Image: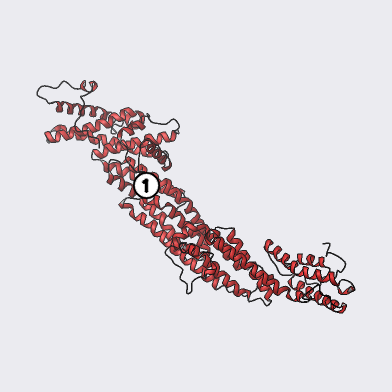
């Protein structure tokens, strides 16, 4: 607080002209005291709010004449100093009563000015404008804290425009002037012992602004668990989206701006600015941060995982700012509520992860996928996990102290470099979920009666898994070695399919296709080959390979193994076989090219000993 008990400079000419020269019997301090009282009386009575007919009753001092407003505040300080002097010299002096009456008139005026500035500038003192003002002030001084007092000379400079940047908008200028005026009035009233009246007005007006702002952001007060559980998930999800949009504005702008404004206006008193900010914001902040905890207590289902993670990320990202803004002891419950919501959300995510794993293991479907295609469970699980990988930061916090308890450790062959994953619980968790899926798919492959089709099913599904890993953030966690190992496994499954699906066709040809055999033996081989190929083709015409790359690789491999042997046999034994030759070598490629689209053709393949295509190929 500015020291105003004794004036260190001599009275100004204008002030000494208002009182007679001091007599020899009066001290210098007494003369100055009388002068201060008379000057204060002149200004205070001029702006007396009790004078109904006065111009001052309908006009704002700080708006009408800022320079006179400054003189008014100085006069009040001088009056306070005079009263202190009188008390020490003669506590029963009639001047004390007169000075006290003047002080009460002055406080009523300042109380009215304070209310008017707060009311008229509701829009100009919105949190965003306050934040802008704070950033400008911070740039003008070498501050190390967001919440720091500014000295009186700086306030004067902002109030009278010597440091108002030309680039500022009119609203920012008005906001800065209003903040300076509020602080000046608050300093004066607090130092005069009238801080209670000032604080009461401030709390009522600013609390209403905070409550209205949250209402306009769509934040609902006190949604109970029972209310939330009665809502459809779509409705809850809509409320979560609204909350996610609101919380960033509430923390970064609303509460931050209120803290800045409160600390600025009541810089003269640590206890006042703490109690003001606490009463204005604590109730609203608690209500805001209780909502995620309520969501976390709702029934857990896999579909709620990602919105729960959204809530977790939002609070986690904002937590440093929450702890800074609500750093007072009186607002510790707000910090605790935010942290508690974070803990409950983390618990909910862990529960849903366990339920998700259990759901994979207990998937009840016994029906086979037509044609050995990608199983719906594979699509669902991999889409789900790949989305989870987008929340790696949140999941890293959530599973950090939640080790994977396995009856047997993950096989080392499952990872390329298992030691690299020891320090990454998220990677292990993802790898485990994928392994649980693959084990389940092994069981589903056994449902196929045709062994070749079961291998094709495994190849298709593992290919889908690998492709999802490659195209998502899962690749970051599972690594190149994991991808390479499982791509090799896909090739092994495809190779097993080829062996089981075409072995009978290949076996119908001589072990050495170029060996000399009799015409009867050749005709017998052609008959066996034609029948075996037609049977294999008809059976596999409804099989599918959805992945284009894998489909082409399998076709090329089958054609190379089967077509090469048949071409050699055909070239060696083409003469004299006649109608026994159902297929020319080039026909095989044309037939194979139609496979794996799931067309489901059940008709017989056409004989074509002299053509090189089918259906115009």
- SS for tag 1? helix
Please state the horizontal and vertical placement of residue 533, each as a whole percent of the image: 78, 73
Residue 607 to residue 289: above or below: below
Residue 598 to residue 115: above or below: below
Left or right of 443? Residue 22 is left
Q: Residue furthest front?
A: 516
Crowding at mark 1 (Cα within 10 Å: few <14, some 14-19, many 20+): many
Please state the horizontal and vertical placement of residue 113, each as a whole percent of the image: 33, 35
Left or right of 568? Residue 445 is left
Please state the horizontal and vertical placement of residue 378, each as a whole percent of the image: 60, 67
Residue depicted at 43% across the width and 64% down the height: 347
Which residue corresponds to mark 1? 207
Residue depicted at 47% across the width and 57% down the height: 393
Please state the horizontal and vertical placement of residue 12, each as a whole percent of the image: 23, 23
Residue 415 to residue 518: above or below: above
Q: How is the image coloured?
A: secondary structure
Residue 296 to residue 526: above or below: above
């Amino acid at each position: 607080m500015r020291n105003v008990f004794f004036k260190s400079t001599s009275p100004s000419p204008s002030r000494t002209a208002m009182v007679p020269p001091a007599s020899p019997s009066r001290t210098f301090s007494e003369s100055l005291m009388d002068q201060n009282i008379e000057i204060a009386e002149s200004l205070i009575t001029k702006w007396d709010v009790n004078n109904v007919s006065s111009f001052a009753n309908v006009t704002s001092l700080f708006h009408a004449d800022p320079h006179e407003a400054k003189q008014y505040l100085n006069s009040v300080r001088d009056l306070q100093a005079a009263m202190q002097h009188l008390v020490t010299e003669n506590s029963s002096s009639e001047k004390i009563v007169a000075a006290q009456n003047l002080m009460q008139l002055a406080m009523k005026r300042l109380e009215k000015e304070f209310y008017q500035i707060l009311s008229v500038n509701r829009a100009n003192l919105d949190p965003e404008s306050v934040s802008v003002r704070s950033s400008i002030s911070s740039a003008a001084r070498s501050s190390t804290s967001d919440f720091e007092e500014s000295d009186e000379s700086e306030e004067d400079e902002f109030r009278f425009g010597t440091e108002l940047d030309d680039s500022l908008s009119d609203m920012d200028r008005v906001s800065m002037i209003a903040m300076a005026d509020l602080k000046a009035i608050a300093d004066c009233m607090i130092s005069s012992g009238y801080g209670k009246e000032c604080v009461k007005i401030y709390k009522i007006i600013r609390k209403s602004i905070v409550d209205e702002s949250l209402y306009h952001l769509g934040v609902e007060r006190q949604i109970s668990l029972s209310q939330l559980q009665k809502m459809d998930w779509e409705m809850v999800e809509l409320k979560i989206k609204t909350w996610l949009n609101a919380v960033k504005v509430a923390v970064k702008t609303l509460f931050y701006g209120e803290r800045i404004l409160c600390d600025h206006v009541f810089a003269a008193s640590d206890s006042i600015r703490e109690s003001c900010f606490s009463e204005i914001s604590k109730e609203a902040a608690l209500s805001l941060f209780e909502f995620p905890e309520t969501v976390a207590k709702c029934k857990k289902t896999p579909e709620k995982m990602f919105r729960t993670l959204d809530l977790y990320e939002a609070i986690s990202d904002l937590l440093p700012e929450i702890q800074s803004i609500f750093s007072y002891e009186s607002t510790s419950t707000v910090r605790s509520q935010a942290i508690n919501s974070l803990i409950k959300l983390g618990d909910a995510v862990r529960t849903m992860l366990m339920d998700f794993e259990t759901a994979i293991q207990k998937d009840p479907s016994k029906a086979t996928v037509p044609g050995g295609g990608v199983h719906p469970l594979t699509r669902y699980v991999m889409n789900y996990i790949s989305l989870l990988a987008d929340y790696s930061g949140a999941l890293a916090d959530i599973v950090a102290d939640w080790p994977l308890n396995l009856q047997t450790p993950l096989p080392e062959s499952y990872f390329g470099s298992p030691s690299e994953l020891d320090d990454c619980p998220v990677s292990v968790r993802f790898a485990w979920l994928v392994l649980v899926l693959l084990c389940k798919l092994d069981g589903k492959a056994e449902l196929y009666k045709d062994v070749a089709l079961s291998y094709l099913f495994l190849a298709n599904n593992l290919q889908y898994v690998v492709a999802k890993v490659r195209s998502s953030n899962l690749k970051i966690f599972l690594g190149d070695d994991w991808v390479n190992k499982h791509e090799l496994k896909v090739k092994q499954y495809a190779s097993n399919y080829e062996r089981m699906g075409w072995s009978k066709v290949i076996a119908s040809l001589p072990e050495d296709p170029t060996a000399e055999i009799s015409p009867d033996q050749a005709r017998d081989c052609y008959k066996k080959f034609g029948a075996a190929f037609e049977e294999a083709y008809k059976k596999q015409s409804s099989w599918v390979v959805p992945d284009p790359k894998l489909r082409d690789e399998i076709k090329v491999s089958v054609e190379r193994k089967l077509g090469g042997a048949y071409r050699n046999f055909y070239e060696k034994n083409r003469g004299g076989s006649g109608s026994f030759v159902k297929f020319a070598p080039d026909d095989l490629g044309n037939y194979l090219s139609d496979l794996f689209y799931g067309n489901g053709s059940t008709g017989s393949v056409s004989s074509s000993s002299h053509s090189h295509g089918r259906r115009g190929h």
